Amino acid sequence: MTTTTLLHIDASPRSGRSGAVVHGSHSRRLSHHFVSTWQAARPHDEVIYRDFGTAPPQAITGDWIHSAFTRAEAREPWMHEVLAESDAFIAELRRADVIVMGTPMYNYSAPATVKAWIDNIVRVGETFDMDPSLDYPYIPLLAERPRRTVLLTAHGSSGFGPGGMQAHLNFLVPGVKAALGLLGLHEVHDIAVEHAEDRGDLLDRSMTEALSGIEQLVRDLQAKVQVG
């Protein structure tokens, strides 16, 4: 069996998982369920884990921009130091076959930690390139093989899915999809748990549906992995 590499990212600042810890994170529960379900069927697959809730990525600075837009062969030692974290994130992304991200929705969008990770991995000459002579000048550099993304989100209220009453306010899923698409990662599956603020039966039903959907998605993706 070919080994598959999962890049597992959690972005919630809550340290525990709901269902196991009081006031635990719903998004951590979803991502853990995906990875544990995956490993139950494929225990030898590799899992790279990043916890941005406890170790957030550094935000982009002027020094980062200066370093990233300096040709690699011309960079000074301090520039390599500034880009070290970004280089590590990109290396993990290159290794990954499946990217699993658990993240809450904050103010209709992604937490700052997720945005910081995106800013660190979207690098010209590394994960995408540009050719101004083309009608669409952006060239993805991570499209050489299939990479599948699973975006598992937690929403305080509801109706953020397609056709929902708040779908037009969901900037989390489209924002992540757009950034990853620039790199060539176009296959993005998203599952959400809603009603976190409502709690009670509404939250319980939403969680049950999300966990069931994750189990089916694992089966579907593992079938794709097995056939290449």
Image (spheres, rainbow, N blue to C red):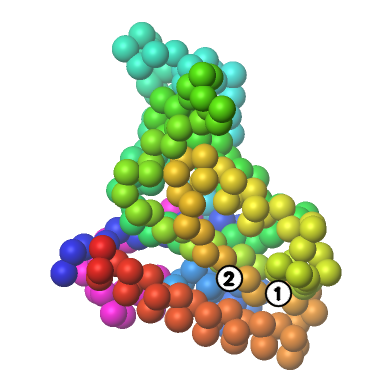
Real-space Cα separation, disc 1 to disc 2, in angstroms = 10 Å
Looking at the image, the residue that sits furthest to the bottom is: 201
Residue 77 makes an appearance in the image? no
**Residue at the (60%, 84%) spot, across then down:** 209
- Residue type at numbered disc 1: Glu
Which part of the image, by quadrant, shows the C terminus?
bottom left
Left or right position of 221 against 107: left
Q: Position of residue 28 (x, y in %)?
A: 54, 68
Q: Is residue 37 above or below residue 151?
A: below
Residue 2's mark? none
Residue 152 makes an appearance in the image? yes
**Residue at the (67%, 88%) spot, across then down:** 205
Which part of the image, by quadrant, shows the N terminus?
bottom left
50 is within the stretch colored magenta: yes
Residue 194's mark? 1
Q: Position of residue 177 (x, y in %)?
A: 57, 51
Left or right position of 35 against 170: left
To which quarter of the image does residue 126 belong? top left
Q: In what element is the residue under mark 1?
A: loop
Q: Position of residue 48 (x, y in %)?
A: 34, 56
Q: How many marks?
A: 2
For disc 2, the marked residue is 191
129 is within the stretch colored magenta: no
- Residue type at numbered disc 2: Ile
Q: Where are the magenta residues, as a range?
A: 35-51
